[in-house]
Image (tube, rainbow, N blue to C red):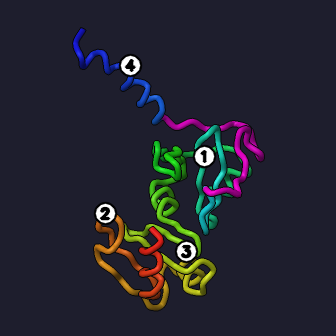
Amino acid sequence: MNRHLSLLPLLFAFAACGTTTQTTTPAAPNGETMSSSSYDRPGFTVMDQDGRLLVFCNEDPELANFKKHGDLVKSVTRIGAGPGGRTVRAPDAETIEAYTLARPGFVTRIADGRIWVFAAGSKDWDEFLANGEPAKSVTKIGAGPNGATVKSSDTEVITKWLAAL
């Protein structure tokens, strides 16, 4: 048998794992539980959904919509991208990226391909949420994972966040 043909069932299995499924039970979706575990990250709401992590930015209107209707209109799934190799599903790719980069004591968001990092609960974080950017910012080009640009309101926050990765 051709070696490439013997891999077809495996490829179909991987393709099936990458498909997005949606729950249909409203209000308290079946199979989802709010977590308070090692999967929690500051600034994110994390739910366990059939062994996958369902992640929302706390300020995302999709979170309220999900709680009300029990499903997502659209979503992105990344197999093995979460802690411990867990599959992560979110309303968009930026949420997954920011979630995987978040560390205790910090809040992260991805905007225009740049990683924004703030001390959790800081006034600068509140300003970022309100205005999309703090009054002053520091940029470290190429300092982040995979050469990403990292921005914050404070150099020390970037330094400590990078040390926590």
Residue 8 lies in quadrant: top left
Neighbourhood count class around disc 4 (C-alpha, 10 Å): few under 14, some 14–19, many 20 upward? few
Identify which amino acid the numbered label 4 is placed on. Answer: Pro
> Where residue 89 appears, x then y in whole percent?
54, 47
**Residue 75 in view here:** no
Residue behind mark 1: 72
Percent x, y for residue 63?
65, 57
Amino acid on which the number 1 mark rests in the picture: Leu
Residue sitting at 49 percent across and 86 percent down? 134
N-term mark: 4 or 3: 4
Q: Are marks 2 and 4 in contact (CB under 8 Å)?
A: no
- Mark 1 or mark 3, earlier in chain: 1
In the depicted structure, whether residue 54 falls above or below residue 130: above
| Farthest-out residue, left | 2
User: Which corner quadrant holds the C terminus?
Assistant: bottom left
As displayed, is residue 21 above or below residue 121?
above
Of the residues shown, which amino acid type is indicated by label 3? Phe
Q: Farthest residue in the top direction?
A: 1
User: Judging from the image, what secondary structure is the residue with disc 1 in?
Assistant: loop
Q: Which amino acid does label 2 sit on?
A: Asn
Which residue position holds label 3?
106
Let me know if residue 28 is in the magenta part: yes
Task: Read off the residue under disc 2.
Answer: 146
Residue 157 appears left or right of 23: left
Spatial CA distance of label 1 from label 2 is: 30 Å
